[in-house]
C-alpha cells in the first residue's frame, strides 16, 4: 500500500451511498505534509510533461493543487462554481453535475488565465463518474490549451469516470484507486497499481 492508501485505511470513513469521507485529512481538515507527498508523487509521474499551469476546481481541489504547484513551480487556476451562467463573453463555461450534491453547476474560468500557450495539469481530490473532470477538460480545450495530464487523489474505480477519461487518451494518475468499499464493515479495498 502507498502512503495515501494507508491513510485512507486509517482515517477514511465509508458512508452509505458509495461515499468515502476523508474530511479529517483531505477535504475539510487538510494534512499539508500528506499533500506535499502527493505533490512530489505527481511531479514524479508527470516528470516528462511541459506543464506550465495547474487547473483545479473549487473547493476541495484547491489545497492539493497549491501544494502540488510548489513542486512544479507553476501557477494554479481554480474553476469557480456558480448556479447561473455569467455570460459576459470573457469566461470559459462548462456544465458539471455534482456527485455529492446531486445538482448541476456551471464551472467558470476567466479567459485571462487560460489560453493556447498553456500546458495544463488538472488536479482534483476525487474521481467518481468523471463529470467534474470532463467539465475541466472541456474548459482547457475551449481555451485552445493542452491537457498534459490529470492527477487525482482518490479514484473510485467501481464508478465509470476513470475508464471514460483513460479511453479518451489522457494520462490519468490516481494516487489511490478504490476497488470496492463496504459501509457496514468500513472495509476499503484498493486496486493494485
Ligand atoms: P464526479 O464528477 O467524478 O462524479 O465526482 C467528482 C466530485 O465529486 C469530486 O470533486 C468530489 O468533490 C465529489 N465526490 C465524488 N465522490 C466522492 C466521495 O466518495 N467522497 C467525497 N468526499 N467526495 C466525492
Image: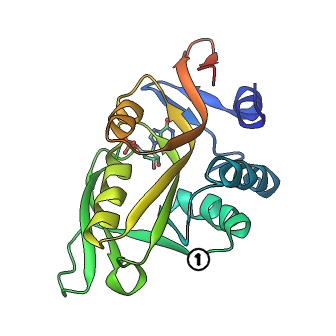
Query: Where ligand 1 lies, by quadrant?
Result: top left
Colour convention: rainbow
Name the outermost residue toward the top: 185
For this rendering, which residue is in front, 26 or 2?
Answer: 2
| Position of residue 189 measured from the top left corner of the image (x, y, whole percent) | 61, 17
Circle 1 is placed at which residue position? 75
Q: Residue at x 73, y 33 (%)?
A: 11
**Residue 13, located in which quarter of the rendered image?**
top right
Numbered label tally = 1
| Local secondary structure at mark 1 | loop
| Position of residue 149 measured from the top left corner of the image (x, y, whole percent) | 49, 52
Placement of the N terminus among the 4 image quadrants:
top right
* Position above or below: 1 against 176: above
Q: Which residue is drawn at 47% across and 68% down?
A: 119
The answer to whether the beta carbon of the residue marked 1 is less than 8 Å from any atom of ligand 1 is no
**Residue 192, located in which quarter of the rendered image?**
top right
* Position above or below: 151 against 129: below
For this rendering, which residue is in front, 46 or 129?
Answer: 46
Q: Residue at x 72, y 69 (%)?
A: 70
Left or right, residue 63 beside residue 147: right
| Position of residue 114 measured from the top left corner of the image (x, y, whole percent) | 39, 78
Amino acid at each position: 500500500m502507498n502512503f495515501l492508501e494507508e491513510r485512507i485505511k486509517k482515517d477514511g470513513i465509508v458512508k452509505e451511498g458509495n461515499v468515502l469521507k476523508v474530511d479529517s485529512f483531505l477535504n475539510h481538515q487538510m494534512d499539508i505534509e500528506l499533500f506535499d507527498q502527493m505533490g512530489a508523487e505527481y511531479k514524479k509521474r508527470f516528470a516528462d510533461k511541459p506543464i506550465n499551469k495547474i487547473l483545479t476546481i473549487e473547493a476541495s481541489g484547491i489545497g492539493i493543487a497549491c501544494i502540488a504547484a510548489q513542486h512544479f513551480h507553476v501557477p494554479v487556476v481554480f474553476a469557480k462554481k456558480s448556479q447561473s451562467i455569467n455570460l459576459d463573453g470573457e469566461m470559459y463555461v462548462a456544465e458539471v453535475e455534482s456527485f455529492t450534491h446531486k445538482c448541476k453547476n456551471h464551472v467558470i474560468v476567466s479567459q485571462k488565465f487560460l489560453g493556447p500557450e498553456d500546458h495544463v495539469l488538472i488536479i482534483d481530490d476525487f474521481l467518481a463518474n468523471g463529470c467534474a473532470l470532463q467539465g475541466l477538460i472541456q474548459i482547457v480545450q475551449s481555451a485552445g490549451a493542452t491537457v498534459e495530464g490529470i492527477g487525482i487523489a482518490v479514484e473510485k474505480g467501481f464508478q465509470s469516470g476513470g475508464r471514460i477519461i483513460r479511453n479518451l487518451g489522457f494520462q490519468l494518475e490516481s494516487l489511490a484507486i478504490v476497488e470496492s468499499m463496504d459501509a457496514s464493515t468500513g472495509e476499503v479495498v484498493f486496486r493494485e497499481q
